[in-house]
Amino acid sequence: MKIQMDCLFEFKMGTTDIIALLALLVAGLSALYARWSWSEAKKANNISLLGHKKEIYDAFYELKMHMTQKAKSAELGEVSKFYYHQKNAKIYLPSKLAEDIEKYYDACFRICDIHRRDGGLTTESGADFEPHIANEKRLAPIIEKALVRLLQEVGT
């Protein structure tokens, strides 16, 4: 006995079916392109933010080096160069890091102010320096480490 099965499927596609399939294909390609565009825009945004973070890091490093070299005789002109960078830190950096940077700048500024006011280290002003110098020395490595970590994260 011979069993014969005829399975014929006949597809008849009309003009509207073809248009619908083409529309589906175009929609799929559009979605892929939109996803790729979003990914590229995100990368461009990260690169732009990296530039701002790098400027803050460079300015911080210059201030840190000035404070290391001058310590209690830090110059107001040099410390003041960091003013706008510490303000921008609130925009481009995590809030905890921005707060630390603001405290660091404040400590450096107060060291300069005491030096300017007293004309240098005197017996009376020595005690005034100590809390600000302690803050500067405590915060500098914390801030530097956090900034370097942020700058390295963008590349990964």
Image (cartoon, helix red, strand yellow):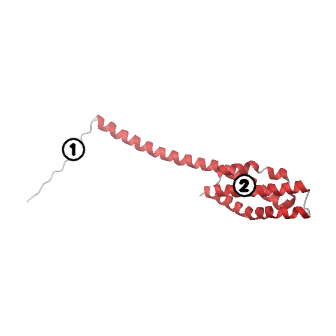
Quadrant, the N terminus: bottom left
- The numbered mark, 2 or 1, whose residue comes first in the sequence reads 1
C-alpha distance separating marks 2 and 1 = 75 Å
In the image, residue 122 above or below residue 6 = below
Q: Is residue 76 left or right of residue 33?
A: right
**Which secondary structure, mark 2?**
helix
Q: Residue 143 in the image: x percent, y percent?
A: 70, 60
Residue at (91, 64) in percent of width and height: 123
Which quadrant, please, contains the C terminus?
bottom right
* Identity of the residue drawn at 31% across and 38% down: 18
Name the spot of residue 149 as percent of width and height, x first: 65, 60
Cβ atoms under marks 2 and 1 closer than 8 Å: no
Compared to residue 12, the image places residue 154 above or below, namely: below
Pinpoint residue 63: horizontal percent, then vertical percent.
79, 56
The outermost residue toward the left is 1
- In the picture, measured across the screen, residue 90 lies left or right of residue 17, that is right
| Side of 35 where 132 appears, left or right | right
Three-letter amino acid code of the residue under disc 2: Glu
> Which residue, given by chain and number where applicable, does mark 2 sit on?
102
Say which quarter of the image contains residue 100: bottom right
Classify mark 2: residues with Cα within 10 Å, few (<14), some (14-19) or many (20+). some
Q: Amino acid at mark 1?
A: Glu
Q: Is residue 138 left or right of residue 72?
A: left
Looking at the picture, how far across and down is residue 148, in whole percent? 68, 59
Q: Nearer the viewer, residue 110 or 28?
A: 110
Question: Residue 10's mark?
Answer: 1
| Quarter residue 150 falls in | bottom right
- Can you tell which of label 2 and label 1 is closer to the viewer? 2
